[in-house]
Image (cartoon, rainbow, N blue to C red):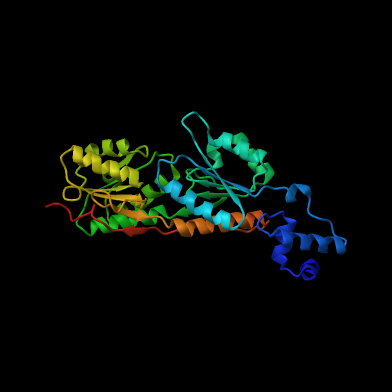
Amino acid sequence: MRVAEFAGVSEATVRRVLNGSPVVAEVTTERVLRALDVLGLPRPSAAAAGRSPLVGLVVPDLQNPVFPAFAEALAGRLNKRGLIPALCTRTADGVSEANYIDMLLAQDIGGIVFIGSSYADAGAEQGAALKERRVPIVLVNTADENQDGVQIATDDSQAVEQALVHLAGMGHERIGLLVGPAGHAPSRRKLAGFSEFWQARGVGREQWQSWVVHALFSLEAGASSVPGLCGRGVTAIVCGSDTLALGAVRGARRMGLKVPQDLSVVGYDDSALMGVVDPPLTTLRQPVTAMADAALNALVAQMDGQGGLSPLTLFQADLIVRMSTARVPL
């Protein structure tokens, strides 16, 4: 309290300076440091004050359009806080999350936001180093069940339920689910919502399980999944990404089917250009802007030394109805 009064700043600002936060203006930091000197109190340690304003944005790849969307939203917000974003993504020549974490740690990184992945993907050694250094971490739509960091995620179960209610309302009784690999946490949550929907309607597990396909997140994987689903009588498909959904449209056309006249398709993310593809894609929109705000706030709070943060914040997706869904064919 005395330091804040002497420096003419808030107690929160004093805590930021003591924790070496890079978001405090240089002139304000100097006023707090002079107050400490006058009051005979120690300045913050070199280790705290020396942390870099660099923040890593780690994404699995740039092929899925939602990853660049999150990275762009976060980069702009970091810049406004005086922080420097560093985009880190796997490359074809073998640069991995582990490589990036090692490089970021060498720069006394201020914090890391993992988008669609987590440090558990990188390896035990890197995870241990991050914990030992107490690097502020936020996980956005983490790919695994990592419980160690602050998590920001879309409510995948609720999102799938929205899509199923939409399709069932148009008369579809056999609806497929096309999601990522079985070990992918968001895909597991989507499957949980799918299961709850059918169980509430008295459809047995042995039946709805035959309408579920796990695949890689690619156009070709989406396309190759369609014949099997259609062979089981499916008239609509809810997909775990827009990329899978566009692949499903391609697969339907290979079979001579029309979307949505013969097969309805729902995507996930509402990536750029989904409103102008043929047909414009009905999809579940992730609230990227709101999630980026929450991720940044959680990161800065950790950089300021605040504890007691909520371990998981869920956001609801919005169903964007376009032209890839229609009433069940007669």
Q: Which residue is the extreme one toward the front?
A: 27
Q: Position of residue 313 (x, y in %)?
A: 51, 57
Using residue 98 as the reference point, say whether residue 205 is left or right of it. left
For residue 85, say whether it is visible. Answer: yes
For residue 310, say whether it is visible. Answer: no
Q: Position of residue 305 (x, y in %)?
A: 68, 56
What residue is at 73 percent from the left and 61 percent from the top? 27
Residue 271 in the image: above or below residue 31: above
Residue 323 in the image: above or below residue 67: below
What residue is at 41 percent from the left and 55 percent from the top? 286
Residue 169 in the image: above or below residue 107: below
Res 227 quadrant in image: top left
What residue is at 17 percent from the left and 46 percent from the top? 258
Q: Position of residue 204 (x, y in %)?
A: 28, 48
What residue is at 21 percent from the left and 41 percent from the top? 252
Q: Which residue is the extreme one toward the top?
A: 93
Q: Front-most of 263 and 158?
A: 263
Using residue 249 as the reference point, say whether residue 142 is left or right of it. right
